[in-house]
Image (cartoon, grey):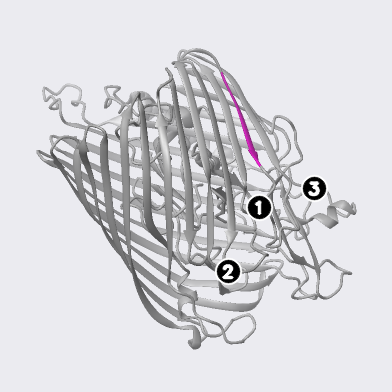
Amino acid sequence: MKKTLPLHHIAPLLFLTRTLAEEAPDNLLDPLVVTGKAESLIGEAATASKGQANSRELGERPYLRRGELLEVVPGVVITQHSGDGKANQYFVRGFNLDHGTDFSVSMDGQPVNFVTHAHGQGYADLNPIIPELVEQLDYWKGPFFGQLGDLSTAGAAKFRFFDLLPQGIASVGMGENHYFRGLIADTIDLSAPTPGSKAIAPPADKSGLTYALEYNDYDGPWEREGNSQRINGFLKYFHQSGQDTFRLTAMGYDGEWDSTDQIPKRLIESGGIDRLGNIDDTVRGESSRYSLMGAWDRELSNGRIHADAYAGKYDLDLFSNFTYFLNDPVNGDQFEQQEDRWFFGGEVRREWDYGDKNLLTIGFQTRHDLIDGIGLYQTNATERIGTTRVDDVYEATAGVYATARHQVNEWFRIEPGLRADGFYFDVESDNPANSGDETDAIVSPKLSLIFGPWADTEFYANAGMGFHSNDARGTTITIDPATGLAADKVDPLVRTYGFELGARTEAVQDVVSTLAFFYLHSDSELLYVGDAGTSEAGPATERFGVEWSTYWRPNDWLMVDNEVTVSEGRLLDVGTDDEIPGAVPLTLDTGITIGKEEGFFGSLRSRYFSPRPLIEDGSVDSRPSWQVNGRVGYRKNDWEVAVDCLNLLGRDDNDIEYFYASRLPGEPAGGVEDIHLHPAEPRTFRISLTRRF
């Protein structure tokens, strides 16, 4: 039965939490000063493409989807090919990352990506993140950083949440297609003395409890209503005393949605279906994620110690239909991907300060995923009519790393790193021939050379090895579950390596500009094909290109930015048909943001990504996409009203395009090869009202 959460059920809870917030003391922890993309990283960053964004920059951006928070990372493009509750589609540096493979995402130390996932390796769903709670987003590109391991060859992003909010937030948003969003968030200061008590908390002791509750409902513009509902909860305890800091964070997310999958271009052109229409009106999904994270930091006279741990529960039940009647002309090709997992892990690291600006870090990381009944089923109208495969999986990994930052002289710094990872895979399949266990290990050296600064300009040379893991089921497979034929096992770990030359300059007043030339190689793009229930070993690939970003902030009320990435990718040792399907050659992101703490404010952002090959021989390309989003609003006395216009130009772009064979009723048995697309949403308006207290 479909779950619903009517607004009148939420209202009492919002009222209660708002009342608690008004009664809470307001002598909170002073907010940490967080730098953004226009701030100086000379002397700090090891590469030209390393960067960070702060809460202000994230909050000023109009966005359609939660995943678009990552578009603050230069060169990253976020799209969607199905229902709103799924993880988004990620593109960066010539990679079509599907739902996250080769781009690692974490939140307060907890990894977002899931290995051996029902819908694809590295699946990274950002729906559990509440944007207003993000204090800082750090990002990296390339395999040059010892603290980053699996799934991080293309890059990585780490969301850090506020320990204590500088202000409480109550916000309501509404828009077209039954869009609604409600949020209440605040921090209760637990370090203040109890009223009437003579006890006074020591000045160095601070503690507080941050809470947030968010509800989101959206039908979308589709002919079949999306019925997307999401509820997020957040609770974080923070305590700082002397040299020690402790954090304990609980997060909960529950979502469900009806999907409009990608549809064949030929059916749109023949007038058989509208761009916003669908073929299978029963596909849908639901997912939840609940987690607990703890972290402890201690400042020492010669460095610091950090330890964190996390544990969580996750599930997904997803119905899709991409080929319609190609494989089963009677019941159709709808399928279900389902999983239920527990996950836990953590990190311990020790940092030593030595000399002037020198640092040595040694760390240990571990992760464990216990997946119960990860399954692929044939379905008709969401009723199971067959089973492709069902497996119980345990996957464990342990990694150790060492990194150093050594200032050789005034103009030369060296940052070497070394990482070693070990993996264990254990698969119990419904077909004993596909059961078994496997182990593998890999060592990844890194090196960064930093020259300068001269005339407020620094230069970088980076080289490093990395890797990504393959789906555990591919490491033990011997029989293809779909055909019954023999199948080849795949290597558990795939070697990658890369190089980068870059520069960062602040020679022009109020301007920060970075330029990076990059090269990335993968020995084999090995992926588990969740739609087919088997693994395929792809050829080796290489990608190279240039990335240029410029940020101009002449004062505290104006910010202008421009980010462009040009890349080229090739399949290796395959002959002349060497195009990488989905690799985007050009992305361009520009924006202007204006506004002070009070008064009128606004933001205008433009995102372009170019046509890209959809097939290896390069004979079929996608259309380009140019999306412009705008925001205008007014702030006064902690009140704020804002209007967003998404897809301001009303363009009929496509979020995603694929080229493959599908079969509609009346078509030949082999189907028809065609472009299958998911259109970008039409122009839409949303209004929000926010009170800070």
Q: Nearer the viewer, residue 473 or 610?
A: 610
Label 2 sits on residue: 573
Name which residue lies at 70% across and 64% down. Answer: 321
Residue 604 falls within the magenta-colored stretch: yes
The correct choice, above or below, for 149 with respect to 28 in the image is below
Q: Magenta stretch mostly in which secondary structure?
A: strand
Q: Which mark is residue 81?
A: 1
Q: Does 215 sit left or right of 531 as displayed?
A: left
Q: Categorize mark 3 by other alpha carbons within 10 Å: few (<14), some (14-19), many (20+).
A: many
- Alpha carbon separation for disc pair 3 and 2: 39 Å
Q: Image height check: is 266 above or below 47?
A: below
Q: Amino acid at mark 1?
A: His
Rendered image: mark on residue 373: none
Amino acid carrying mark 2 in the image: Asp
**Disc 2 crowd, CA 10 A, few/some/many (<14, 14-19, 20+):** few
1 or 2: tag closer to the N-terminus: 1
Say whether marks 1 and 3 touch (CB < 8 Å): no
Sequence order check: which comes first, mark 3 or mark 2? Answer: 3
Say what secondary structure mark 3 lies in: loop
Residue 121 falls left or right of residue 345 = right
The image position of residue 664, as x and y in percent, is 83, 66
State the residue in front, 571 or 267. Answer: 571
Task: Report the span colored magenta.
Answer: 602-609
